[in-house]
Image (spheres, rainbow, N blue to C red):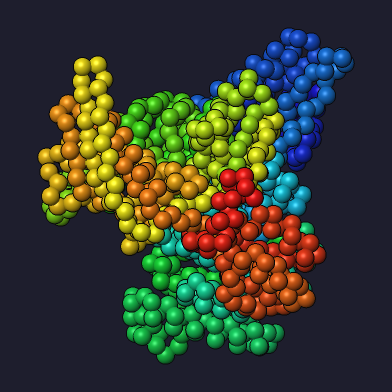
């Protein structure tokens, strides 16, 4: 039966009689999102009074006939039209639940959606309906674009889940172990309990609009963190209080440094056995070389953790032990009579904090030394908070907070800190903004593929306003596309909006050719005008650069894949479907590389690790319905040369009535500095005019020849190619020049002494003392080089370097050796030369002799 929630308190027999009817999975009066029409359309617009009576009539008595069902559909369409035109009168929020008819039964049963329902969509708190315009376009000073980053299993997704619950956007607390969190919505994420894709959510907190991105912690998905940090203004670094700084924490911290992202630290899991506030603070200071500003102190640790102390206001925050969701907590000022030791500790921490901030901020130092030099206790909290904000934005120190996301403690103060200390978009200065003035300038930082809508493009808007049906010019692709719809991201559900201004993160539908890292502007003429301004400014500052190049916003650096394997469809008839699936997945994930083996004709899948390739294989099966077969995982080696050699080659071809004649002499030698691509040099006596015409063809030939080395067919690196002589017959095509140079480079590489380079991984294993000797013995058999063994609480942390080829299936072996108690993290360090014995074994294996 289709039911409608009606305003309580109406007279019997009138429309809206009685109490609220229950909504599946919800609570009375809760707004809901409709999935009826295949689109995420907000259905939280209330009915006008005149429509309430029509609603009751349209619903009519049960059982329904076809006419009644048609009326309900028309009513749904009317609501969508009302929502899209923003004609939203004030009043009670009404609910209507979609139903479906079973052909075998002459009655209707309520349809329970599989996805999670959200208690209120952006802008709704309880039954309060805000102005849609104020929801969509808040003042830029009230916007915070932040990311949650950490080592795997530090509690990022759980923290995000609590943030959404306390800000009023979910009805219940999701759990990673139960697989019902908002941001981990992929089937693979829920099965494994890890984050694979970054997910964006938009919500409000105390008048601030927060665009939050939950990022993965696994090293295989580092590129997800990289491309999200590129468009954020601030980040929350989450730490496991019992482990402090871990391997992947260092990686994401370096990424944040590269993009100049201000950070605040959240010491999570303060309730965990072995949690130590002082140890975590010390590891931040030592390993990250950061200056922690202690804004909170824990009340108890591990099992005794029950709350925290606000150092700035000298108040203690205690959570109600009888509360299941952590919403009930009270702030109490610290008193000499009740908490003498805690008050003393807090006063010392506050004085130390004031001295720290005064050392880093001149304005605050003048205030402290002048007006409040006699008594630091008189310094107003607002002045101290403003100074901490300046220090955080300048990245000279990082505020540190603590809590336990799983036990629902410390999340509300963390949200307050995000709005108070992290910068708004206008506090981040971008050189290119004044070139565009008020025209649109945005960066596409992520692409998702939706079966119904096609490609969904996440973009950060830096200037101007974006609207649906707007024609957008892509500078990277030099093409113009029309944006059909504009959405606000909310994990796997999205809310359609009429416009969005600078500083926000949006989701665009209809951009079929846009890829990760593309710069989007209002039009080609707008880009040309901005290029002219950039060129003029460059000339004034004596910078010699191309105006068009300076308009491109910095994209994302994609690391080279280290694993590869063959992938085959179940039959040749399914090959086009597999190609389409891989093309879509490549647009979503730039770190996934697909190439065709020229000898066997097989499709080669290249990824960042075993888990990465496993996830891609699983997604092809689930999302595209293809049962593919993967070949054995193989390591991506590199090759180089050990000595300098010279080679000469002549290409003489007659095509039609035209003779193509090229003679090339060049030298290949080991490079002084490590370089993935060949370093190209030219002899001084080469003709400049000839080089001007043929330089591009020469470089194309060299790069092409270095893609396949003479030993195993892997790319050649750490090599310098010097061109000594180039003789070109008049009328010779550039293609022939490239072919001759390529052949000559290959001849030189074959003459030289060749060396195989293997990927060397940085390994960190956390293991208990009981199993340390077993782990060390196993690593010795894997050609491991142990650097150091540290003590972390009751565990030992082994760090070292191990060849990637020896780490196949290591997770299973480590679980067996340690009874499942140890964890490890791997990260590519560099490529190193194999010793002659290992190289011979590898060559024999590849040639089938072993």
Question: Depth check: 201 or 27 in front?
Answer: 201
Q: Quadrant of residue 741?
A: top left
**Side of 446 relative to 104 (left or right):** left
Total labels: the figure holds 0
Q: Work out whether residue 575 or residue 308 is closer to the camera in this orientation and state it.
A: 575
Q: Nearer the viewer, residue 665 or 640?
A: 665
Give above or below for 41 relative to 718.
above
Left or right of 244 in this view: 290: left
- Residue 242 is situated, as x and y percent measured from the top left of the image, at 67, 72
Q: Residue at x 67, y 17 (%)?
A: 73
Q: Residue furthest bottom?
A: 374
At 72% across and 25% down in the image, what residue appears? 98
Q: Nearer the viewer, residue 713 or 468?
A: 713
User: Does residue 649 show up?
Assistant: yes
Q: Is residue 204 visible?
A: no
Image quadrant where residue 542 sits = bottom left
Residue 291 image position (x, y, % from top left):
47, 75
Kindly give the residue lying farthest to the right in the view shown: 105
Does 538 sit left or right of 709 as displayed? left
Is 804 rendered above or below residue 616? below
Q: Quadrant of the N terminus?
A: top right
Is 545 drawn above or below residue 302 in the view shown? above
**At x 25% / y 29%, what residue is drawn?**
652
Rendered position, 84 above or below 321: above
Q: Residue at x 77, y 31 (%)?
A: 112
């Amino acid at each position: 039966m289709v039911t409608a929630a009606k305003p309580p308190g109406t007279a019997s027999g009138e429309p809206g009689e009685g109490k609220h009817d229950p909504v599946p999975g919800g609570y009375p009066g809760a707004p809901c999102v409709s999935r009826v029409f295949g689109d995420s359309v907000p259905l939280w617009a209330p009915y006008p009074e005149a429509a309430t009576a029509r609603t009751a009539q349209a619903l009519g008595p049960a059982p329904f006939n076809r006419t009644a069902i048609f009326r309900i559909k028309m009513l749904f369409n009317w609501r969508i039209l009302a929502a899209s035109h923003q004609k939203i009168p004030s009043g009670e929020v009404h609910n209507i639940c979609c139903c479906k008819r079973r052909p075998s039964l002459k009655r209707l049963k309520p349809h329970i959606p599989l996805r999670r329902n959200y208690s209120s969509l952006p802008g709704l708190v309880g039954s309060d309906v805000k102005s849609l315009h104020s929801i969509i376009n808040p003042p830029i000073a009230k916007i915070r674009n932040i990311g949650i980053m950490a080592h795997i299993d530090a509690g990022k997704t759980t923290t995000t889940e609590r943030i959404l619950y306390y800000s009023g956007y979910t009805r219940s607390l999701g759990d990673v172990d139960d697989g019902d969190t908002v941001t981990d919505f992929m089937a693979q994420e829920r099965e494994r309990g890890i984050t694979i894709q970054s997910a964006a959510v938009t919500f409000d907190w105390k008048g601030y609009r927060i665009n939050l991105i939950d990022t993965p912690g696994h090293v295989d998905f580092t590129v997800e963190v990289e491309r999200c940090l590129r468009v954020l203004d601030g980040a929350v670094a989450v730490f496991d209080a019992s482990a402090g700084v871990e391997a992947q924490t260092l990686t994401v911290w370096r990424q944040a440094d590269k993009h100049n992202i201000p950070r605040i630290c959240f010491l999570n899991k303060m309730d965990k056995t072995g949690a130590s506030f002082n140890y975590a603070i010390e590891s931040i200071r030592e390993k990250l070389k950061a200056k922690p500003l202690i804004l909170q102190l824990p009340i108890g640790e591990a099992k005794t953790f029950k709350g925290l102390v606000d150092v700035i206001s000298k108040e203690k925050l205690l959570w109600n032990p009888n509360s299941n969701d952590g919403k009930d907590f009270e702030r109490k000022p610290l008193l000499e009579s009740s908490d003498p030791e805690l008050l003393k500790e807090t006063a010392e921490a506050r004085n130390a904090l004031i001295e720290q901030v005064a050392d880093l901020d001149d304005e605050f130092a003048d205030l402290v030394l002048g007006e409040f030099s006699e008594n630091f206790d008189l310094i107003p909290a607002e002045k101290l908070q403003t100074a901490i904000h300046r220090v955080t934005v300048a990245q000279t120190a990082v505020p540190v907070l603590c809590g336990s996301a799983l036990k629902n403690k410390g999340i509300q103060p963390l949200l307050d800190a995000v709005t108070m200390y992290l910068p708004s978009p206008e506090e981040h200065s971008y050189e290119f903004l004044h070139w565009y003035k008020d025209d649109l300038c945005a960066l596409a930082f992520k692409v998702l593929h939706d079966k119904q809508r096609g490609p969904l493009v996440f973009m950060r808007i830096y200037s101007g306003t974006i609207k649906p049906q707007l024609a957008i010019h892509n500078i990277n692709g030099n093409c113009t596309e029309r944006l059909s719809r504009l959405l606000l991201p909310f994990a796997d559900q999205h809310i359609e909006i009429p416009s969005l201004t600078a500083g926000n993160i949006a989701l665009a539908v209809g951009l079929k050719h846009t890829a990760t890292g593309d710069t989007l502007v209002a039009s080609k003429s707008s880009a040309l005008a901005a290029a002219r301004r950039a060129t003029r400014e460059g000339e004034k500052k004596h910078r010699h650069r191309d105006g068009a190049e300076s308009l491109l916003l910095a994209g994302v650096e994609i690391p080279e894949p280290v694993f590869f394997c063959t992938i085959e469809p179940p039959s040749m008839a399914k090959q086009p479907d597999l190609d389409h699936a891989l093309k879509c997945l490549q647009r979503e994930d730039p770190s996934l590389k697909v190439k065709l083996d020229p000898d066997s004709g097989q499709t080669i899948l290249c990824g960042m690790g075993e888990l990465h390739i496993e996830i891609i294989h699983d997604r092809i099966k689930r999302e595209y319905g293809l049962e593919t077969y993967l070949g054995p995982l193989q390591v991506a080696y590199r090759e180089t040369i050990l000595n300098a050699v010279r080679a000469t080659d002549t290409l003489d071809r007659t095509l039609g009535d035209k003779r193509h004649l090229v003679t090339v002499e060049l030298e290949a030698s080991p490079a002084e500095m490590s370089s993935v691509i060949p370093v190209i040099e030219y002899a001084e006596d080469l003709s400049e005019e000839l080089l001007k015409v043929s330089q591009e063809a020469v470089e194309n030939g060299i790069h092409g020849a270095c893609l396949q080395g003479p030993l195993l067919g892997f790319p050649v690196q750490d090599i310098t190619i010097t061109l000594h002589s180039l003789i070109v017959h008049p009328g010779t095509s550039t293609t022939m020049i490239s072919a001759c140079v390529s052949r000559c480079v290959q001849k030189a590489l074959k003459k030289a002494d060749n060396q195989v380079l293997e990927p060397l991984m940085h390994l960190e294993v956390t293991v208990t003392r009981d199993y340390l000797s077993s782990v060390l013995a196993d690593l010795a058999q894997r050609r491991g080089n142990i650097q150091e063994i540290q003590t972390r609480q009751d565990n030992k942390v082994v760090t070292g370097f191990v060849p990637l080829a020896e780490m196949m299936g290591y997770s299973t072996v480590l679980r067996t050796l340690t009874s499942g108690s140890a964890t490890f993290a791997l990260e590519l360090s560099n490529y190193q030369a194999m010793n002659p014995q290992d190289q011979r074994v590898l060559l024999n294996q590849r040639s089938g002799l072993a």
